[in-house]
Amino acid sequence: MEAVMTPTNQSVATRILVVDDSRVVRKVARRILEEAGYDVAEAGDGAQALAQCHVTLPDVVLLDWNMPVMNGIDCLRGLRRDFGPDEPSVILCTTENGADFIVSAIEAGAQEYIMKPFDDAILIGKLEQLGLTGRRQ
Amino acid sequence: MTSFEEIATLVKSRSGLTLGPDKTYLLETRLEAIARRLGVAGYEALAPLLRHDRLLQAEVVEALTTNETLFFRDTRPFDHVRTVGVPRLLAGRPGNAPLRVWSAAASTGQEAYSLAMLFSEMGAALCGRAVQILGTDIARIPLARAREGLYSQFEVQRGLPARMLVKYFRKEDESWRLIKPIRDMVEFREWNLLSDAGSLGRFDIIFCRNVLIYFDPPTKSRVLEMLTARLVPGGLLFLGAAESVTGLTSSLRPVGGEHFVFEVPRVAATVG
Ligand SMILES: C[S@@+](CC[C@H](N)C(=O)[O-])C[C@H]1O[C@@H](n2cnc3c(N)ncnc32)[C@H](O)[C@@H]1O
């Protein structure tokens, strides 16, 4: 195996995997995140997301709660089973904000949650709260 | 004097807030509602009405304050309190006097309550020491909100870890209210930073963040001297990320090379 470190894989930018079945939501998230200097990858459902994490583990997964094929909570459980409790950080995105919902999300291993629809301030604010700033900031 | 100058002078003498000539838009937008209520055309017409009306003056000052804030703003000051500040203060002052903490530009209360949650999380690390937190601000409406301890979904999403939200808040319709033990740790009071704060006593920790930026250098110096005088020996003063003491006071120096936390150096403390 060629263990060469190319400049690209030495990149220090925080890598974020955006998981949502809506292309529009993924596009909005990508624009916000790239503008703030984060590296962005996308997945259209939980199963794809899990598979992609096995290839390249991102720093953060921005995970939609309601998705076909594999929903957010199952994907989250899969991530915790395969990669442990801390990696990657998971921010669940949802239209729910009941205390019970948030408690169950945390118990399932999410670090944070944000309400949909989100904007720049909310998304970047959450990442910074987790100590993850974009490269160009 | 133009109406703008007259209002700017009044606001500065009452609050320290400095309005440069580029801030006419601020008067236009922020004072519009007051002018409309009084049935006068625009902020210019407010100037004569303000001359002898203290209540209206206070209302105008309040309308020109910026009350933007969030939970655990900038995070690092809060980490510093937990990991460095409190252990140092407890070691320096044995006994069981309560730790006194002042959030000196408290706005809607997020800073004071972040500190309350932080101390609550520290538990045993406080060695049984009680904590009293005072939150003050010149603006009454934000203070009334602070006392309620009720925040919108948007506000609890900013800066507040989800884990703390579910631990320290209860949902009320679409908002979230801090639980009583946390609310009870904080007292809110109307207070002007330009006044002599002797009657407030001394504090182990003072947070005075994101308010000096609105003052001119002489006012900054004056407020920094006042805050310095309110610190117990070894006490810590936290300023906002964009604020510093350089060129404003010689009584304070940064702690451990950090740019947001200051103390009175030992020598100066004993001489002064
Ligand atoms: C931007 S907020 C800062 C809130 C919080 N400390 C933070 O950093 O997030 C500034 C606050 O300072 C208050 N303020 C302005 N002038 C003041 C004065 N002379 N005395 C007391 N408070 C003042 C305003 O009313 C406003 O709520």
Image: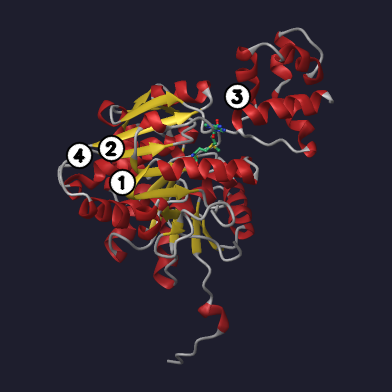
Given residues B162 and B208, the one toward you in this image is B208
Give whichever of discs 2 and 4 has the lower sequence position: 4
Circle nearer the viewer, 4 or 3: 4
| Figure check: B145 above or below B246 | above
Badge 1 and badge 2 both on one subunit: no
Q: Circle 3 sits in a helix, a strand or a loop, which is it?
A: helix
Task: Tell me the quadrant of the picture where the N terminus of chain B can be found.
Answer: top right
Check disc 1 and report the residue beneath it.
A106
Circle nearer the viewer, 1 or 2: 2
Specify the subunit that label 2 lies on.
B
Q: Circle 1 sits in a helix, a strand or a loop, which is it?
A: helix
Mark 1: give few (<14), some (14-19) or many (20+) Cα within 10 Å. Answer: some
Mark 2: give few (<14), some (14-19) or many (20+) Cα within 10 Å. Answer: few
Q: Circle 2 sits in a helix, a strand or a loop, which is it?
A: helix
Tell me the distance, in whole angstroms, between the alpha carbons under discs 1 and 2. 11 Å
Check disc 4 and report the residue beneath it.
B97
**Residue A110: image location, x then y, percent:** 34, 50
Tell me the distance, in whole angstroms, between the alpha carbons under discs 1 and 4. 37 Å
- Look at the numbered disc 3 and say if its residue's Cβ is closer than 8 Å to ligand 1: yes
The residue sitting at 51% across, 30% down in the picture is: B195
Tell me the distance, in whole angstroms, between the alpha carbons under discs 2 and 4. 28 Å
What is the quadrant of residue B261 in the picture?
A: bottom left
Check disc 2 and report the residue beneath it.
B167
Are dots 3 and 1 in contact, CB under 8 Å?
no
The residue sitting at 39% across, 69% down in the picture is: A54
Badge 2 and badge 4 both on one subunit: yes
Are dots 2 and 4 in contact, CB under 8 Å?
no
Q: Is residue A78 visible?
A: yes
Circle nearer the viewer, 1 or 4: 4
